[in-house]
Image (cartoon, rainbow, N blue to C red):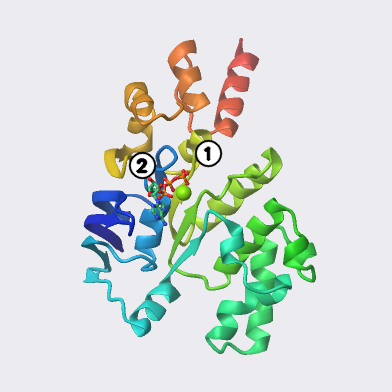
Amino acid sequence: MIKTEDLSYKYEDGTIALNDINIDLEKGKCIGLIGANGSGKSTLFLNMMGILKPSKGFIKFKGKRLKYRKKDLREYRKKVGIVFQDPEKQIFYSRVFDDIAFSLRNLNYREKEVKKRVDKSLQMVGGKDLEKKVVHFLSYGQKKRVAIAGSLVMDQEVLLLDEPTSGLDPKMTSQMKAIINELKRDKKLLISSHDMDFIYEICDYIYILKNGEILKEGFSKDIFIQNDILKEAFLETPWLVKVHQTMNIPLYKSEKEFLEKENKKEVQI
Ligand SMILES: Nc1ncnc2c1ncn2[C@@H]1O[C@H](COP(=O)(O)OP(=O)(O)OP(=O)(O)O)[C@@H](O)[C@H]1O
Ligand SMILES: [Mg+2]
């Protein structure tokens, strides 16, 4: 799958945004990339998409080094997709339908197949009612959904999601959790977020970035109990872990599990 080997990236103004990054998406099914503002998450996503080219090191996909010719990138992006942090960057057409259909039409898919896939993608993000709308007038959360649907139409093997919940209200955040849990079934996911509760619940393997370097990596259940490491990276401990650490309650993976198990206990008492 995707691997980065000693990847470093320096912007034109001299900012070293990434330094010797080694990431392997084989380590988990759904991988979390966490780190404070400016730690390098989006830069790493752009490198992994081949939008930026590493200053040092390289990307490997299924054991082969990524090449940067137009033709190679086109093939690569049939298998690897991204949802950008800023939905505005992903929106090209004024009508929602056309916008989501863009990449399929670009690859000369038949209009019947285009319609089928756009419908399915909008359904997945709960946005069927948005189909005929003008993108410009949508709310931020609606634009975010359209951007995700725009990636889902391609049905890639790997999906990189840069801050999928930023700017979303609690209802939409929990819908996003459900969407991602659905996607996890048949795709490899790499997700960045500042929402530690969200990452804790949905990811099984974690990379912590700090100042462009990997501060720590490991399984979610091992990483999130290390308060000192999280603090060092300026990150929060998830509430389920806090409850576990302070109230002598088992470490649950999700709010659902917590409520079910703890309610059962109360009934027994
Ligand atoms: N186009 C650019 N030119 C110069 N420096 C940049 C550019 N884009 C990002 N940077 C710098 O690179 C570093 C990493 O930025 P990046 O956007 O990758 O961080 P991030 O972890 O995604 O942050 P956030 O959580 O705020 O989204 C920062 O120091 C940032 O200022
Ligand atoms: Mg970012």
- Asked if disc 2 is less than 8 Å from ligand 1, the answer is no
Secondary structure category for the residue under label 1: helix
Q: Give the quarter of the image for residue 104.
A: bottom right
- Up-down: is 132 above or below 142? below
Q: Give the quarter of the image for residue 269.
A: top right
The kind of residue tagged 2 is Ile
Chain-order first, disc 2 or disc 1? 1
In the picture, measured across the screen, residue 188 lies left or right of residue 144, that is left
At label 2, counting other C-alpha atoms closer than 10 Å, the crowd grade (few under 14, some 14-19, many 20 or more) is many
Task: Name which residue lies at 65% across and 47% down.
Answer: 175
Task: Report which residue position mark 1 lands on.
Answer: 198
Quadrant of the snapshot with the N terminus: bottom left
In the picture, measured across the screen, residue 126 lies left or right of residue 230, that is right
| Viewer can see residue 49 | yes
* Nearer to the camera, 189 or 11: 11
- Up-down: is 17 above or below 112? above
The kind of residue tagged 1 is Phe
At label 1, counting other C-alpha atoms closer than 10 Å, the crowd grade (few under 14, some 14-19, many 20 or more) is some
| Viewer can see residue 125 | no
Residue 99: x and y, percent?
65, 73
Residue 239: x and y, percent?
52, 25
Residue 2: x and y, percent?
31, 62
Task: Name which residue lies at 40% across and 29% down.
Answer: 234
In the picture, measured across the screen, residue 214 lies left or right of residue 247, that is left
Residue 93: x and y, percent?
67, 74
Task: Report which residue position mark 2 lands on.
Answer: 206
